[in-house]
Amino acid sequence: MNTPPYLELQAVSNFSFLRGASHPEELFAMAKFHGYDALGIADFDTVAGIVRAHVAAEATGVRLIAGCRLSLTDGSIVLAYPTDRAAWGRLCRLLTLGNKRGDRQTFQLTWDDLAREGAGLILILHPQPHDDRVNERLIALKRVLAPGEPAMVRGYLGLTRHFRPGDVRRLERLQALADRHDMPTVVVGDVLYHMPERTVLQDIVTAIRCGRTMETLGEDREYARDRHLKSPADMARLYAGFEDALGRSLEIAAACRFSVADLRYQYPEESDVVGETPQATLARLVREALPRRYPTGVPKDVLKQLKHELDLIAGLDYAPYFLTVNTIVRQARALGIVCQGRGSAANSAVCYVLGVTAIDPVRSGLLFERFVSAERREPPDIDVDFESDRREEVIQWIYQHYGRQHAALCATVMRYQPKGALREVGKVMGLSDDLLGLLSKHLASALGDPDVLRARAAELHLDLSERRLSLTLAFATRLLTFPRQLGTHPGGFVLTRDRLDALVPVQIAAMEDRQIIVWDKDDIDALKFMKVDVLGLGMLGCLRRCFEFLESHHHRRLDIATIPAEDPATYAMIRKADTLGTFQIESRAQMSMLPRLKPTTFYDLVVQVAIVRPGPIQGDMVHPYLRRREGLEKPDCPSLQLQAILGKTLGVPLFQEQAMQVAIHCAGFTPGEADQLRRSMATFKFTGGVSHFKTKLIEGMVDQGYARDFAERTFAQLEGFGSYGFPESHAASFALVAYASSYLKCHHPDAFCAALLNAQPMGFYAPAQIVRDAREHGVDVRAIDINRSRWDCTLEGRAGSAQFTVRLGMRLVKGLSNEQAARIVANRMPLYDSIEDVWRRADVPVSALERLAEADAFRSLDLDRRAALWAIKGLAPSVLPLFAAAERFANRIESEFNEPSFPLAPMSEGADVVEDYGTTGLTLRRHPVSFLRGDLQRRGMILCADLARTRDGRRVRLGGLVLMRQRPGTAKGVMFMTIEDETGVANLIFWKDRIEAQRPIVIGAGMIGVTGILQREGEVLHVIANEVEDLTPLLARVGQASTARQERAAGNERTIAVKARDFR
């Protein structure tokens, strides 16, 4: 007997979000194993995974039949498969409608919707177990079918075994019912996972979605039995007697001619001159902009490069894309928003001349083909950074300018991470909340590492042989990277000329005034669609604020482009690692590298930005570069070609462009193959994809005369790039912002400090460290004052000095709103003379006055914290400020100055410091650790500043507030910590075994004592931590003597609230 032909039309992937238990790639790999020619993917009410399925189909040679499983409002389930491109557009519009109508909470689609938009779709009614309404659903389906069109082309009844008693008789009844309606049947497997071993994981994701435990899953658990992808032979055996229904799967597959590869992107039209082509418009704009970039004349090599780029852009028809980006950037600048293009776009002279980017690629020797390539024939990708706190203005302008039918953000696929996976799997296994919290805190980061997992479990006295616990850990590990839901990309816009929802479904995003497509940036890249990244960079907002201060107070007009280049004082400051608050070079790793690399030019700064990255570190590029820079070894460039490529980085390949050029010129790669190498480096973190180039690159270099050990070393360096290798253009763009911020810090520390505080939160350091650093640079910083402060920090004149004083702003007062501060500022002329005056004129609630009093903002009224709080209590809460004057006239309330005077005990300085930290996060008084110096000295702890006078290798003890912890993913478990005392900061290094041995203190302490060995490398100091002590309880002593609120009960005194910033 011949096996009836069969193709599986209905496989559900994990992009149905907790409804399927296999990745699309796994389903297609199994389909190939079973010998299928095609496989249908029909996820629940979405096509979010269809591009991944398309890529997997191309990789396996198994054709994708794109479809969707539609949930109608009457409970019907309909499988929909587009037969051509137009039908795909209608399916996308249906999904868009169903998502928007349900307002993100539900999917709402009706039979009438299918009747309006169903042309070209093959629809399969898919009855569920115990469905007693199949007859009326078939009637509804028949009404949807186009009049006069044969039903077999459009409508089918799906037959699926559920492996329950009477299953075959159920299929026979469905077949008979279909025959009465003249409706053909087709077998669909209702596949939920690719192999039987995923059954339990399917149960787990179902329980997570339903909010149940495994014990209470019930019928939903039974439904998932035996739902793996089966071979055609197995399907023939299971559906014996339904051969015609089996064979119709091939009939449907043949009718579905649509392919995801058929999708074509259409650029928006940007030309503002009637009859002018986009290419002509682009060329004209470049010509008009040249004098602005080159006021003394355009160099010949720039003209040559522009011609080359414009010719290539014309040949690839990319001019509309450049025009779109230019339109957005031009509008942002019209709004006064600082912006700068970065990434590979900085390789383009066209982008530079138009003002999209700020790096001259001709002068910098950057490679345009890294950005646009005739061989690759893929759209360029331009990332533009805008001020973080004004980026929303740009986003909403894009929606308004292009229209919401033509503009949406990309999605991001929110995947399970260790903590989330542990918590959700643990819940369905019935573990207690306390145990889940313990697992999430201590075991999550060890998932996938059995040795560390066992060690940590032993510390916590957990029995890993306990069945529910062991299953939780095992299946949480398997759930990692599974899609959980769709999120919103920070700023990746897809803009189209025609309706966007005819290309891809659009849905309402969780963020207000946002809509997203259901595909992420990787999907967009795979389809070669245009995307404009509208990203946020906090430092740009800081720079803009600083430029405004310079113009208004120093009468100096600057912007990023006009900041003096190659300033010696700026580089001297950078070499000393005096870079707190600057961009990119403020981290501990960067600060440690700066005195060793010793930047003296802008290109040194480009290298500095790029070299302190996991890629160069993993590729063992850092130490060879530093040794060569210090003259301790010679650059190893055994050919003139290699010298031309790697000469400026001393023979070390630091940038992706260099990796491409080495592959082309030294190993015989074509430009296309070199770009594949670059892409492999970009995805190495997930795929390890560089390795399959190993033989080709090494043998290619050997064939061209390079020594094998040199070729192998070169490959090892390239492989180390991982997903972290910087394009040189990207490093140059970031280096420019780093230089600009450093210049401003060096020459205008007052304006830079105020601007940086107003741009918070951003960067590595909290306001307390920013203010301390500014004061160490001679900046006078004054406290928040009811009659002087605005919402933002401001600059005030300083007698006898060209430098200005920084006045802290009310934005630092915890619990005070911008709107309340604005009312105080708007009504304080003449200046306030009492708290009652503030309350009466500013019309702010008493709670706002209390926040200001606790922040010690009434000193200019001769009121300290306690006196101010006492005066506020004298305000009658029942009297509205509007009628305060009349009430006062009637003597119904008394001013605080008319009340009997009671002496209030002054607060200790320590108590004031505690209150400062509690209300504003910083103090202008003594450092809190200074109050504890006696305790620390008795413990044998030295000052942080003493480290500079201590010999290398000495054992030291010191203590301080924990400012930050950083544990890079590539640091092999090492943690870097910065602590601070009254004299400065100290940098600590914790090896992995020390972290595990003292984990609660290392991870959780607010103040820490450490014993370790001082490591000195040039001007760079670290303490290699051995033993730690939690000193956090000592902080309670700082303000123990007194508090601002007298009624605070004894024993409940406020303690220093210092929260460390933790980074990965």
Image (cartoon, helix red, strand yellow):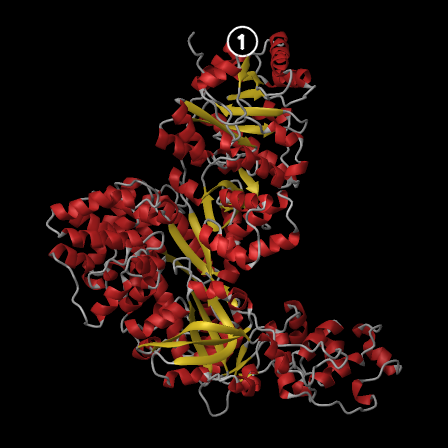
Q: Position of residue 389 (x, y in %)?
A: 52, 62
- Give residue 313's position: percent from left, percent from top: 29, 45
Decide which of 753, 679 is in the foreground and name it: 679
788 on left or right of 701: right
> In this image, 413 relative to 856: left or right?
left
> Considering only vertical position in the picture, is 494 above or below 609?
above
Where residue 739 sits, quadrant-wise, is bottom left
Whether residue 974 appears in this view of the structure is: yes
Residue 63 appearing in the image: no
Front residue of this view, candidates 36 and 554: 36
Q: Work out which quarter of the rendered image holds the N terminus and state it.
A: top left
Could you say where residue 427 lies in the image, as x and y percent from the top left? 63, 46
Q: Using the image, determine if residue 528 lies above or below residue 177.
A: below
**Residue shown at 60% from the left, 34% from the top:** 98
- The residue singled out by tag 1 in the image is 241
Position above or below: 963 against 693 = below
Looking at the rendered structure, the secondary structure element under dot 1 is: loop
Q: Position of residue 369 (x, y in %)?
A: 26, 49
Q: Residues within 10 Å of mark 1 (few under 14, many from 20)?
A: few
